Image (tube, helix red, strand yellow):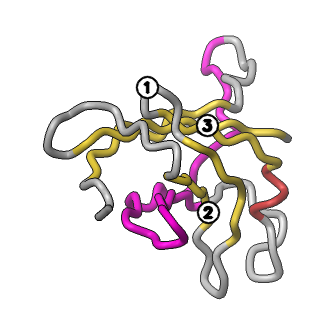
Amino acid sequence: MMVKLIARFVNAHTGKAMVDPDVGARIYDRDPVSDEFLAESRLSADGEAEWLFSLSAAGSLDSPGERRPDIYVELEKAGAVFFQTPVKFNMDFDTRDPVSGESRGQTRFLGVFHVDSPEP
């Protein structure tokens, strides 16, 4: 199953969208032994990053068949990580509508994160 995650990053001091084209946003699955890199994105003009990846990429030897990954994002510039989001534990991509029973989709919004800009 393919899933899509979206997050928005704003400057902690000004509240304006982070739009630095040199900032990479990497998404990971936190695991007991080794975290899995899932995907990377650049920030849009609105400060948003979007990742599309297979849920099976979250599975590994320490978490085979994982369906509810523990997701976090790291922002990096010039190879140096300068921000990490809190971990969102047990993200459920199998949620169904309680009335219709239909899938609610595999797109999730992680939230808006207030970030101190990296040093130049």
Give the residue displayed 82% in from the left and 48% down from the top: 54
The quarter of the displayed image where residue 81 is located: bottom left
Of the residues shown, which amino acid type is indicated by label 2?
Tyr
Query: Mark number for residue 50?
Result: 3
**Alpha-carbon span between mark 2 and mark 3:** 13 Å
Q: Which numbered marker is on residue 11? A: none
Question: On residue 28, which mark appears?
Answer: 2
The magenta region covers 70-99
Q: Position of residue 1 (x, y in %)?
A: 85, 41
62 in relation to 107, above or below: below
Is disc 2 placed on a helix, strand or loop? strand
Using a 10 Å C-alpha cutoff, classify the residue at mark 2 as few (fewer than 14 neighbours), some (14 to 19) or many (20 or more): many
| Distance Cα–Cα, label 2 vs label 1 | 22 Å
Q: Of label 2 and label 1, which has the lower sequence position?
A: 2
Looking at this rendering, what residue extends furthest in the bottom direction? 33
Principal secondary structure, stretch drawn in magenta: loop
Q: Amino acid at mark 1?
A: Asp
Tag in front: 3 or 1: 1
Q: Is residue 94 above or below residue 99?
A: below
Asked which secondary structure carries label 1, the reply is loop
In front: label 2 or label 1? 1
**Label 3 CA crowd tier, 10 Å (few <14, some 14–19, many 20+):** many
Q: Secondary structure at mark 3?
A: strand
Tell me how far mark 3 sits from mark 1, CA to CA.
11 Å
Q: Which mark is residue 46?
A: 1
